[in-house]
Image (cartoon, helix red, strand yellow):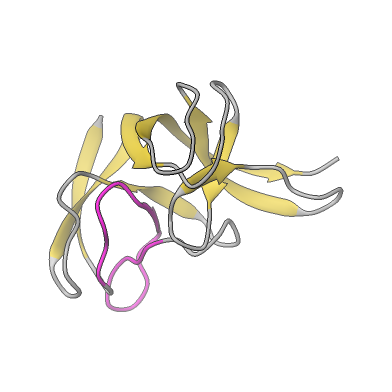
Amino acid sequence: MFVKSYRAKTAIRPYRIVTYPQAGGISEAQGGTASLLGCSIETGADAKGVVDIALSNLAEVRFGGTVAAGEPVTADAEGCAVKAAPASGAQVFVLGFAVEASVSGDIGDVRVSPFILTGV
């Protein structure tokens, strides 16, 4: 896993998906409508603190729903990983792929490889 430190704009909980830096730092993702950067590691950070973010390879993330191994994942409103399943013609930002089957509340591995998924 490649990890880089960023300034947290808002408090960031451990194992949460985050978005790219904006003025003031990075924030937890609030859905799959913004480009996803990576996920916070086990420490998280207070607002204005420094947080380590896993940017590539395997990273641990908290799941917010049932996901099968190999399925693409995006963020829910809490920054947790959920199955990426956009409606026909809609787009969603994807963090990567679940490495193992997980359910809500699990902390599991994701292969971080961001892309945009369009529903068919």
Where residue 47 appears, as percent x and y from the top left, is 20, 74
Where residue 52 appears, as percent x and y from the top left, is 18, 50
Query: Is 15 a magenta residue?
Result: yes
Where residue 92 appears, as percent x and y from the top left, is 66, 51
Instruction: Please indicate whether residue 103 sits to the left or right of residue 16 in the image.
Output: right
Query: Is 72 a magenta residue?
Result: no
Q: Which quarter of the rendering shows the N terminus?
A: top left
Residue drawn at x 17%, y 75% as measured from the top left: 48
Where residue 51 appears, as percent x and y from the top left, is 18, 57
Quick check: 110 above or below 32? above
Q: Quadrant of residue 42?
A: top left
Q: Main secondary structure of the magenta part?
A: loop
Quick check: 2 above or below 19? above
Residue drawn at x 40%, y 43% as measured from the top left: 105
Residue drawn at x 13%, y 62% as measured from the top left: 50
Q: Which quarter of the rendering shows the C terminus?
A: top right
Instruction: Please indicate whether residue 89 sits to the left or right of residue 118 in the image.
Output: right
Quick check: 83 above or below 1? below
- Label count reads 0
Q: Quadrant of residue 117?
A: top right
Q: Quadrant of residue 46?
A: bottom left
Q: Closer to the camera, 82 or 113?
A: 82
Residue drawn at x 50%, y 24% as measured from the top left: 101
Quick check: 104 above or below 11? above
Per the rendered image, the range of residues in magenta is 11-28
